[in-house]
Amino acid sequence: MTKRNEVKAADNIRILAASMVEKANSGHPGGAMGGADFINILYTEFLNYDPSDMTWINRDRFFLDPGHMSPMLYSVLSLAGFYNMEDLKNFRQWGSVTPGHPEVDVDRGVENTSGPLGQGHTMAVGAAIAERFLVERFGDWMAHKTYAFISDGGIQEEISQGAGRIAGFLGLSNLVMFYDSNDIQLSTETDEVTIEDTQKKYEAWGWNVVPINGNDTDEIRGALKHAQNETERPTLIIGKTIMGKGAVTAEGDNFEKQCSTHGQPLTGAGASFAKTIENLGGDAENPFVIFEDVQEVYEQRKEELIKAAADKKAKQAEWEAANPELAAKLNKFFSKEAPKFDFSKIEQKANSATRGASSTVLAAFATEIENMIVSSADLSNSDKTDGFLKKTTSFKKGDFSGSFLQAGVTELTMAALMNGMALHGGVVPVCGTFFVFSDYMKPAVRLSALMELPVKFVWTHDAFRVGEDGPTHQPVEQEAQIRLLEKLKNHNGENSMLVLRPADANETTAAWKMALENTSTPSALILSRQNIKNLPTEGDAYESALQAEKGAYIVETAEGTPDVVLLASGSEVSTLVDGAALLRDKDGLKVQVVSVPSEGVFRNQPKEYQDSVLPVGIPRFGMTAGLPVTLEGLVGENGKVWGLESFGFSAPYTVLDEKLGFNGENVYNKVKELLA
């Protein structure tokens, strides 16, 4: 590509980006205009993918962190042939394929949903880890790069510290990140909020850092070539760019580097849209145009990419022929089908904590589910993900032969890494920490639900029974918050998350079965610290626990029509069983006890089944170690919920059970009050 065409192509991206925002009267043109030079060189010379097969597993990935720079991404992808001019004209409109912040659409070249700053590049780190994991198992023939694009805001977000530390620690030389350093953010210039030396910070984390003029194509090309040759470290290219590059006023005066162009159309920012488009070589009356010579450049690149991908696929075919068993395994990993696993063979220790029961399942996974990656935020021996770790090893720089990621104390980063692994494909990501710290993770969990990623979240220490650790570590409102994602539908009309709080060890096995087999949304397992008495069953305990697959089921049946229905999830179910025994023995009441590990799944069952579990017109009593609202929808307006309405307290959990009324005697008393 000639220097003239390099500039013209970047200006074409600038024109389209500015025009999209102007037409929508909404959006962020300035950053897109500044980043155009880098994105053009990346797509025309370095990013390897197959335009005829966008889901090709060995493609390079490009993760955009600042989702507000979507006009830049849509524009370069329109040059590459994945969006037409009508798509760009409908930017931010109802039903458009060009939403305000990108939503994952691999067929069109959008690898990740982005918007909340910091998460996009952290997902890229997760994808780079997945690539190293798979190359370790199948060979260098499938090696590829992960590129990320980050802005000043993303660099400032706290999550960037965890992502930077982990990528440097693991020596992810397959990761190349461009930092669009234009010194402007939404409401201020960056020197009004920070004096940090970003280059030194990333060098301290073990990155290869290359500072350049981010609008100079020769320097961009040189930096990317340098990154290709790096074999020990991830690379950060710090590109000093110009916010709103090319923007001018009505009088033709320079209007670059203005904070106002960050988050509003050029006209609203104080620039002249028409003069700016003319300044960039376009027609303000007809700006949605791809220049003919720019189109030729991208068409030529398309042909080169398809040929290069065909050559790589031919090499892959040779490898598959020589390694049929490995080839079958690789195909299975990327099939998006749930791994096959016989849960009936799991032998659980009776009356154990559900975190311990989960550990038993994870230990079995470690030897059979070869593409599972488990991570913990410095709590593997407490959240019991070490059941998996004991059968494998942790990732280290240059060694991805194991399957465990020690994430360190960085819950949000860990969750975003899991999302990146899921987006890359080929692996089953699992991560664990204390349930109270789901508060740290919520932004990434929400994106996981929005992107419909089958990440498995393991949250232990599920209630005030954390005890002596006190209220800072005792979840109260967290279950209600997470269960909202059971009520929130994704864009496919499904519950956006599967949330499971098993009532005993066998239900935990069943819950893991549901989570592993759920390949369309994220799953959460909410698990106890303390031991829980096994639920009463007739026959095989695991087969009985499989009733959990309907979201709720009858643990103890009343003879005939029940006088009252007791319902709960988790450890409170066994407390209800104790209370039910008192109600029968003392008052001869007919009591039905129900376990509800997932209200979301239960609400999806036929009405006839729901009515059999929770008969209409029968008084209901619910018990939850969380906020009463967690069960109020199931109990109904004529029922009663015994839950917590305050933070917890520091004391042994047995004392807390007594003081807070979580025992069979209180169940008896409260049900009598309800029936009276």
Image (tube, rainbow, N blue to C red):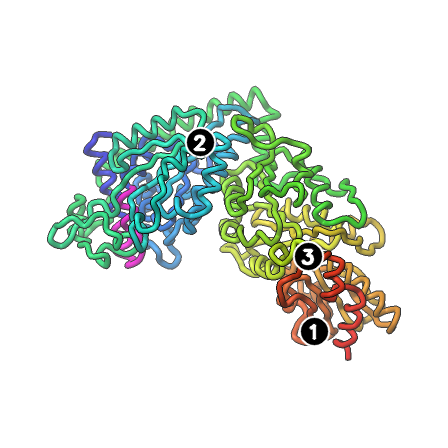
Residue 123's disc number = none
What amino acid is found at the position of numbered circle 2 in the picture? Gly
Dominant SS of magenta comes to helix
Q: Is there a contact, CB below 8 Å, between mark 2 and mark 3?
A: no
- Residue 374 placement, left or right of 225: right
Q: Residues within 10 Å of mark 2 (few under 14, many from 20)?
A: many
Residue under pointer 1: 639
Question: In the depicted view, which residue is nearer to us: 34 or 189?
Answer: 189
Neighbourhood count class around disc 3 (C-alpha, 10 Å): few under 14, some 14–19, many 20 upward = many
Mark 2 → mark 3, Cα distance in angstroms: 44 Å
Q: Which residue is mark 3?
A: 597
In percent of width and height, residue 527 lies at: 68, 51
Which residue is disc 2 drawn over? 206
SS for callout 2? loop
Q: Tell me if 327 is positioned left or right of 602 in this view.
A: left
Residue 31 magenta-drawn?
yes
Q: Give how far apart the Cα atoms at labels 1 and 3 are.
A: 19 Å
Q: What kind of residue is marked 1?
A: Gly
At 65% across and 31% down in the image, what residue appears? 392
User: Where is 621 relative to 409, above or below?
Assistant: below
| Disc 1 from disc 2: Cα separation | 59 Å
The magenta stretch spans residue 448: no
Q: Residue 418: x, y in percent?
A: 54, 42
Question: Is residue 104 shown to the viewer in this render?
Answer: no
x%, y% of residue 120? 43, 44
Q: Are marks 1 and 2 in contact (CB under 8 Å)?
A: no
Region rendered in magenta: 18-35
For the C terminus, give its image quadrant: bottom right
Kindly identify the amino acid type of the residue bearing the numbered disc 3.
Pro
Q: Residue at x 24, y 42 (%)?
A: 12
